[in-house]
Image (cartoon, helix red, strand yellow):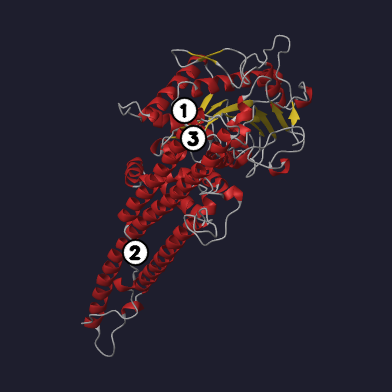
Amino acid sequence: MSSALPRAVSAADVPDIDADAEGLDTAASTIRSSGRRISLVADQIAWNWSSAIPSALVSSGAVEGLYSAMTPPSVAAASLASDTDGAAAALSGFAEAVQTLRSRRDRIIEDVATFHSDALSAQNRADGDAEDGAAPAWDDDHRLAAKNSALAERIDALRRDWRTARQDCSDALGKLRNSDTKDALFPGRAPLSPTQYGYDFPGAASAFDRRISARQIDLLERLSTMSGDELDRWRAGHPAQYQGFIDLPPDPKAVDRWWRSLGDDPNALTAAQVALATGLPVLIGNLQGTFYSARDLANRTYVQEYRPSGKDTDLDKTIEKIKQQIALADGTGTVLQITTLDPRGVPRVAFSMGNLDTADNVTYLVPGIKSWTAGDDAVPQWMNSASALLNEQDRKDLHHTHAVVAWIGYDAPSVVTEPQRAQADKGGAYLAGEFDGLRATRGDDPTLNLVGHSYGTTVASVALQRTHVDRFVTLASAGLAADERSDLGVPEGEMYSTEARGDYIADIGRSWWSGSEHRTKPTAGFGTKLFDVSQDGDLAGSHSHDSNPGTLQDDGSWDSAGDGYLSPGSHSLDSVAQITTGRGDEIERTDYDG
């Protein structure tokens, strides 16, 4: 009787996955929380200096000097926090890969043991049946030889994927902010370009290289074959990977190809698409490259399934505001799509007034500081502005369909953190991803307009260094994070800017004494067309920095006061509607630039 199988694979051939997934997750959590504590402490220090000390100083230039002196530590801390977040994301992704690879290793070892048992049984039978001469070897059986070959291929693939996972983690850490000084988180590497300063969450293809996209698509394909119960188990067992698609997204064009393989009509989702949207709401609800009807279904599913914590958290407040907007839209028969709902940390949400799957003309509105979804005003105020702009666009352009997106899709800064551009860098990356996703999903490439208010123009300028739009409008810009007009992906002659007389807040956002990192003012010399927003007949003039002042009603609606940059009935809103419908040559121009 033979006790060995020469030329057969064995358990000893299977590589060890020698990493502690639980330890990696713990390290990631510790690194992330430490970085955020550093950022918070630095902000508090800057606030204490800027609010307490200046009142005791009367010397000329002392206050400005303090601002300048305290800004670098705060900025450095924010950069370090961004780096530690990036390191944590890389380690979490590696931990997820370790868990997956270990499961594959266990299955391979089980299958090798089963194969050995079958092969030994066959070999023993051959030994017993042999009368003269040598008995046939186990691998003379084509079925067993094929199984052995398949197992060898699986072992080789596991070895390659284990090597790739380690390299991916190393690459991700290596692409964090680095310099040749010892001050960086990972010193010793050449510095990245300014547009890649810090860890680029939405640009995961640059952090984990293109290989991550292929593996994410492979995972999506496997998920699309699972039953509802299997999706529930996968979601519960892989929380980091489930939500990780938001910050580590695959190529939206590849997503679009995969999604359309399941069904090609956004107005009639297939059973497989519905199952994914309702079974994986956070993943599909934020996945660039899927139909917006599916993202809306996914995000509404999340809202319906959400159970309040009872602690009045930011997410509790955000979900309640979304429910109010759904009820208001349903009551008036308005087309409303929830195209983004990121429940992590500071919740991020985007609402589309109009159908993003079919609209000929799409406009994104980007708000400025303190525009948090959990706040009292941001959601109702910007929904009111989006609705008002959509109505004006429909009235001025009868031959095209329109959609306006209230994009509250980034962690807006406070007054203290506004001088920095870290939040604009991260928000701009998210916004650029939105535009790339829109173009991937909409092969007909609808006209795309971008309207930013205050710090929203800073966010927009970061996005436009990564992607392009057809028209760009800045309202009361707090300063662009770009030095030259040519840095922005906007056609010549299609950038428009305004600042109301009496609006002094925008000047502070751009000022050197506040330590601003986004000082570029959109002027005629920069290459933008300045337009007037003072009173024009029945159209109200804008006189302050507000985008749309008003009063919040009990049902979550917004009663506009009518004199903001995006208030219904304002000269400014009328001009924005003309610009975004291709009639920018009809607006009233001005030489006033703030």
Q: Is mark 3 on a helix, strand or loop?
A: loop
**Which circle, 1 or 3, is nearer the viewer?**
3
- Between discs 1 and 2, the one toward the N terminus: 2
Q: Is mark 2 on a helix, strand or loop?
A: loop
- Between discs 1 and 3, the one toward the N terminus: 1
- Between discs 2 and 3, the one toward the N terminus: 2
111 left or right of 152 in image: left
Q: Residues within 10 Å of mark 1 (few under 14, many from 20)?
A: many
Q: Quadrant of residue 498?
A: top right
Q: How crowded is mark 3: few (under 14 residues within 10 Å), some or many (20 or more)?
A: many
Q: Which amino acid does label 3 sit on?
A: Asp
Q: How crowded is mark 2: few (under 14 residues within 10 Å), some or many (20 or more)?
A: some
Q: Would you say residue 315 is visible in this rendering?
A: yes
Q: Which residue is identified by label 3?
A: 411
Q: Which residue is identified by label 2?
A: 17
- Indicate the position of residue 193 as horizontal and vertical percent values: 61, 52
Q: Which residue is drawn at 65% across and 13% down?
A: 569
Q: Which mark is residue 585?
A: none
Q: What residue type is labelled 1?
A: Thr
Q: In which quarter of the image is residue 276?
A: top left
Where 550 falls versus 251 (above or below)?
above
